[in-house]
Image: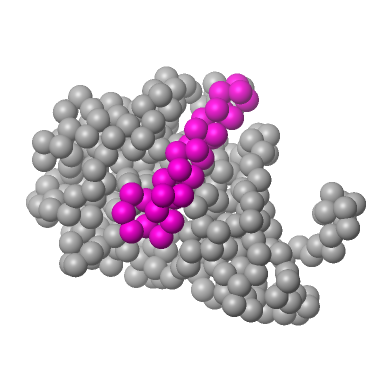
Amino acid sequence: MASLSSVGFHAQIVAMPDGEPNKKLAIVEKLAERLVALGATRDALLIAFGGGVVGDVTGLLASIYMRGVDLVQIPTTVLAQVDASIGGKTGVNLRSGKNLLGTFHQPLAVVIDPSVLSTLPEREFRSGLYEALKCGVIGNAELFERIQHATIKDLHQNATELEWIIAEAVKLKAGIVSADEHENGQRRVLNFGHTIGHALEAESKYRRFLHGEAVAWGMIVAAQIAAAMGKCDERVADRICTATLGLGSLPKVTAGTSSILKRLGSDKKVKNGRVHFVLPRKIGEVEIVDDVPKQVIGDAVESLRRMMQ
């Protein structure tokens, strides 16, 4: 606030509750009413200062308040820095599923300062690294390998390495989004791990998993499916599973397989009645498929329980 004031900005703080349970339309309405009370007009600029939930909610608010105002993203978590703040997607959840209400609204700028991550709880820090690992699987083998061979302690202590990981993840996502802003083709590869991940989040009412943790389980399921369908070698699937689990323990999956499968039907990635999965072919290369047999999906989800034993 002091910094903004010193260069002539008349800034106001509008606070919102954090956490995925607050990523809902009711919060957007409350924030909009607060903007009106503060006298915000069509020339307002909203700065999303916080994690992925703050960025998604503020982005949606900016896209619809007075039919659209300017937005700047200043992400303060690993997950928001490597993923949520990049690409212009905004959205909130419904009880039926994740991110089912949203818009595309590109920020004027995304300002990333890795030094703010020093105060993150380890679980939040690790959650974001799963998304960075995802970027490695879909298009950057070196990024995957460097995360695979690092430890959380290493990355907390090595600012240069952490900055490299964040920058590489941002470059990859920004390049994909630039080629396919509205997710009509190539951008869909960014959903690796999200098909099952979103189902886990929704089924647990957004209270059991951090987003990156749910995506981590989703990546493991996708790797298992890919191996079962012959899309990748078993060794590739094992590397993905080992690297993901190597970052730390994940919350247990308690939802039943049938409940998770039912959730897939309301996922945004369903097209023409078919659930689309992003499956790895090798580290750094994936493909999108829509013909995964239900039994194969169920078997892969069931395999999670064996991994937790």
Judge from the rendering whether residue 103 lies leftward or rightward of residue 271; answer left or right. Answer: right
- Residue at the location (84% across, 49% down)? 3
Q: Image quarter for residue 274?
A: bottom left
- Residue at the location (36% across, 66% down)? 97
Residue 252 lies in the magenta-colored region: no
- Residue at the location (40% across, 53% down)? 180
Position of 160 relative to 113 (above/below)? above
Q: Image quarter for residue 281?
A: top left
Position of 238 relative to 6 (above/below)? above
Instruction: Examine the residues drawn in magenta and state their main secondary structure.
Output: helix
The residue segment tinted magenta is 158-187
Residue 174 lies in the magenta-colored region: yes
Nearest the viewer among 203 and 51 is 51
Judge from the rendering whether residue 54 lies leftward or rightward of residue 131; answer left or right. Answer: right
Asked whether residue 258 is in view, the answer is yes
Colouring: one colour
Nearest the viewer among 112 and 260 is 112
The picture places residue 165, in percent across and down from the top left corner, at 51, 30
- Residue at the location (52% across, 49% down)? 86
The picture places residue 127, in percent across and down from the top left corner, at 47, 41
